[in-house]
Amino acid sequence: MKTSRIALAGALTIGLAAAAAGCGSGGTSTANNTPTTKPVSGGTIVYALPPATNINWYFPLATSGNNSLYNAQLTTQLYKPLIWINSKYTINYQSSIAQKITSNKSGTVYHVFMNPKWKWSDGTPVTSADVLWTWQIIQATSASNAPAPWPFVGAGSGDVPTGIQSVVANSKYEFTVTLKKPANQSWFIYNGLSDFMPLPVQDTLWNKYPNNITQEVKYLGQQATNPKFDNIVDGPYKLASATANQSWTLVPNPTYPGHKAYDKIILTYEGSNASEFAALKTGAVQVGYVDLSEYGARKELTSDNLFPSYGFDYNYLALNLNSKAQNGLGPVFQQLYVRQAMEMALNQQAVDTAIFHGYAPPQYGPIPTTPATAYLDPRLKKPIYPYSPSKAKKLLESHGWSMQNGVMTKNGLKLAFTIIYSSGNTSLDEQLALFQQNFAAIGIKVNLKPEPFATMLGIIANPADEGQWDAAGGIGIIYGGSYPTGQSLFGTGGGNNFAGYSSKKEDQLIAATHAPQPSTAANLQTYFNYEYYTAQQVPGYLWTNQVGTINAVATNVHNVQQYSNGLTGYPQFQYWWAAK
């Protein structure tokens, strides 16, 4: 279960109710979906994915172009993570492969004790041998010469693999990880050890080239898009079928030693918000969402309970800082004053009020204001760059830009470009149309181009496509249970640093959050130092509204709200059940 994941802003996942102050009514009901009768098994629950979202990667370790929340939502049903982060952002050892983790005072040595109850679906125990095989794969897929489609997106996060001195099996159910230098224990456990999801070393379909790791990871990368590849699992579900642009069916794993799943889960592709809403009305979808463009029609869902939720994430409009960016604008976007002016042009308050009905509080940095967490620097409850078109325009003019035929121009170069974004989401269409107007007010001409989510992600995450885009919108990063550092997000060469931002000071501040501190207060202040600087830098990402989700759950479906974990984005489907 790897760190930060890419998601569609405003349609992240079902989650724990946490309405923003001043928000309107959630809809027909705000019931908790608590069981009113004894759970029954054997039913089917259809769960709607966000519009134009495909699941296209079935291997637990991802590449940057496949590092979506939705791919991970499926694989975490099939494969147990080493550590499971709950809705309180702490480790739930009952749902983890690890039953205990200890570390020394300096944070250089970590002993992991595995729970012997976990087994693969072929009856083989999950052991340290599986973890060591995972470690081999991580090393090979993180190498600079890793074969396509690698590298592993987690390379560098949690200092994996280069910061690790050794990984040793002490016994069948215990292993030790030793680091090269002291580390903040929480950071390494959440961002480093979380990579060590056991993989089935005994599976000859997976472990096909045991004596040639390079050939092995090349093969794994080729098979990662093949849903039939997942034949031995240790999670609560098995993958019964997968059809692109249609549906993915999970059936209970009968040998799972944890809480056995009640019902079959079908994750269904939706072409648009309208088609998903229609499916909710007819009952074809039992667990879904109400796009906020359809807010006025929410009372038509007479057979659904509605509740709002927010993920622990941030949403952004990405700017391509790479030198090969389209229209020659990469070097322009590299200028901090340009990013500051663009941030001041965005009217987040209007977006919240006019489009999202109060369910999209403004956001001014990499940590959301909602839900409230200890990670939010109090200084970032207010904007560093308040909305002001006049100041934004003057800032550009003070650096030599001038309005020519309605477009800011300098040395013949125009501030004109296209924003690609995920299609099928009406409220996102409206949000970006408003941003288009905001930019026009300061002389920036923007065209909008919708693309299927996987297509957009593939373009911005592929280094070979650096010259194929200028900006991308409607994207979110959900921390997914990771320690919310910026290493893979804003650090030089980070796996999710699609913008190509690089700053020595940023790297130093990020590194400081990874080091052990003398006290909890000192640790938090070090984190705030990184967070505030990142917010000031607008590091290739314009901060945009923290868009919430209104979740819709059929009244006969239970335990959804309790076991959805909106903070991380990973539901526990095995606890959901439908009354007959």
Image (spheres, rainbow, N blue to C red):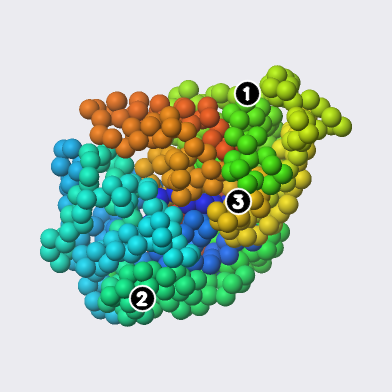
Locate residue 431, reporting x and y percent.
70, 42
Q: Check disc 2: other Cα within 10 Å, few if <14, some if 14-19, many if 20+.
A: many
| Label ID, residue 294 | none
Q: Is residue 489 left or right of residue 408?
A: left
The image shows residue 239, relative to residue 128, as above or below, that is below
Cβ–Cβ under 8 Å for marks 3 and 1: no
Say which amino acid is labelled 3: Glu
Return the residue at label 3: 466
Give the residue at mark 2: 206
Q: Dot 1: within a 10 Å radius of its alpha carbon, few (fewer than 14), some, or many (20 or more) residues?
A: some
Camera-nearest residue between 362 and 438: 438
- The local crowd at label 3, few if under 14, some if 14 to 19, many if 20 or more residues have their Cα within 10 Å, is many
On screen, residue 202 above or below 274: below
Q: Amino acid at mark 2?
A: Trp
Kindly identify the amino acid type of the residue bearing the numbered disc 1: Pro
The furthest residue to the left: 171
Q: Nearer the viewer, mark 2 or mark 1?
A: 2
Foreground of the two, 145 or 258: 145
Q: Secondary structure at mark 3?
A: helix
Q: What's the residue at 50%, 71% (across, down)?
A: 225
The residue pinned by badge 1 equals 386
Image coordinates of residue 94 in percent, x first then y, are 26, 57
